[in-house]
């Protein structure tokens, strides 16, 4: 969704600079979603951010918010704790969610809420990149694919048996990828195995003691 034309009623921007990408979302005064933008920055954070912000040149920007800890903005805009912001969004959208799974490029976590939407606890991944978006990014490069989206598309098209690939360790995964190719597994099957391994790793890490409440 992109921003079209001028909007003189005003927008509020939420900007998140991640380890591999920048995300921007815009809402109006009533909190209604007006648009969003996403782009990989490949280390060129300032340049990529400037490119994304160009689409808001014809808009009245009422305010900007960003998750806490983002050194690019914390002296200039309002900063909020990411988990608090997520809980506020769940309440605003009346989702009645009990469990929220967040998978980023560097980490993943499960946030659990009580029936009234109050915070209960959060379970985190380890510091290792396995089971995160960065893990799939690394494997996409090794397989000469354009990006993680390309890898995911290949996985969805697979209908063949999948090889065993160690999704818990990028080093071991590299060896398993080579062995899978030598055994004649197709690219779609390999991509499918990587995605399945990532999902299994998340489940084993976060759901090993109990099944999260739904929705």
Image (tube, rainbow, N blue to C red):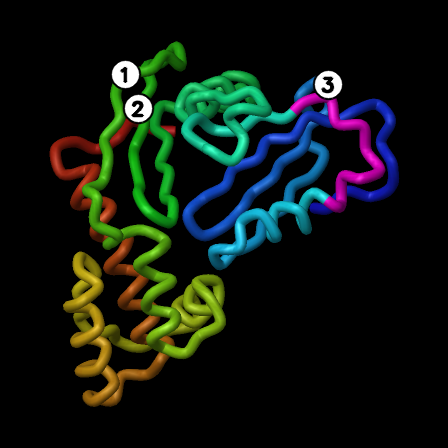
Q: Mark 1 or mark 2: name the one nearer the start of the chain.
A: 2
The Cα atoms of the two marked residues, 1 and 2, are separated by 5 Å
Residue drawn 42% across and 22% down?
A: 81
Quarter of the image for residue 33 reads top right
Dot 2 alpha-carbon crowd within 10 angstroms: few under 14, some 14 to 19, many 20 or more: many
Q: Is residue 6 visible?
A: yes
Q: Which residue is mark 1?
A: 120
Residue drawn 80% across and 39% down?
A: 57
In the figure, 23 relative to 181: above or below? above
Q: Which residues are magenta?
A: 54-63
Q: Mark 2 or mark 3: name the one nearer the start of the chain.
A: 3
Query: Are dots 1 and 2 in contact, CB under 8 Å?
Result: yes
The mark closer to the camera, 2 or 3, is: 3
Residue 204 pos. (x, y %): 17, 45
Q: Which residue is mark 2?
A: 112
Q: Mark 1 or mark 3: name the one nearer the start of the chain.
A: 3
Residue 13 pos. (x, y %): 65, 30
> Nearest the camera: 163 or 109?
109
In the figure, 76 relative to 196: above or below? above
The Cα atoms of the two marked residues, 2 and 3, are separated by 29 Å
Residue 110 pos. (x, y %): 30, 33
Residue drawn 26% across and 30% down?
A: 212
Label 1 sits on a secondary structure element that is strand
Q: Which residue is mark 3?
A: 29
Q: Is residue 58 left or right of residue 88?
A: right
């Amino acid at each position: 969704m992109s921003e079209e034309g001028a909007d003189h009623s005003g927008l509020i921007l939420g900007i998140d600079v991640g380890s591999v990408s920048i995300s921007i979302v815009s809402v109006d005064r009533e909190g209604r979603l007006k648009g969003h933008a996403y782009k990989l920055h490949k280390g060129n954070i300032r340049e990529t951010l400037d490119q994304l912000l160009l689409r808001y040149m014809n808009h009245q920007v009422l305010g900007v918010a960003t998750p806490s800890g983002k050194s690019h903005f914390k002296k200039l805009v309002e900063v909020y704790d990411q988990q608090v912001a997520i809980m506020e969004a769940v309440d605003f959208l009346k989702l009645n969610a009990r469990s929220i799974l967040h998978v980023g490029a560097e980490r993943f976590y499960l946030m659990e809420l009580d029936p009234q939407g109050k915070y209960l606890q959060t379970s985190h991944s380890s510091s290792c990149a396995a089971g995160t978006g960065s893990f799939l990014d690394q494997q996409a490069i090794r397989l000469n694919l354009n990006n993680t989206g390309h890898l995911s598309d290949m996985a969805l098209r697979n209908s063949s048996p999948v090889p065993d690939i160690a999704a818990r360790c990028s080093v071991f995964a590299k060896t398993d990828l080579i062995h899978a190719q030598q055994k004649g597994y197709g690219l779609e099957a390999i991509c499918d195995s990587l995605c399945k391994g990532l999902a299994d790793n998340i489940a084993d890490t976060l759901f090993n003691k109990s099944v999260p409440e739904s929705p």
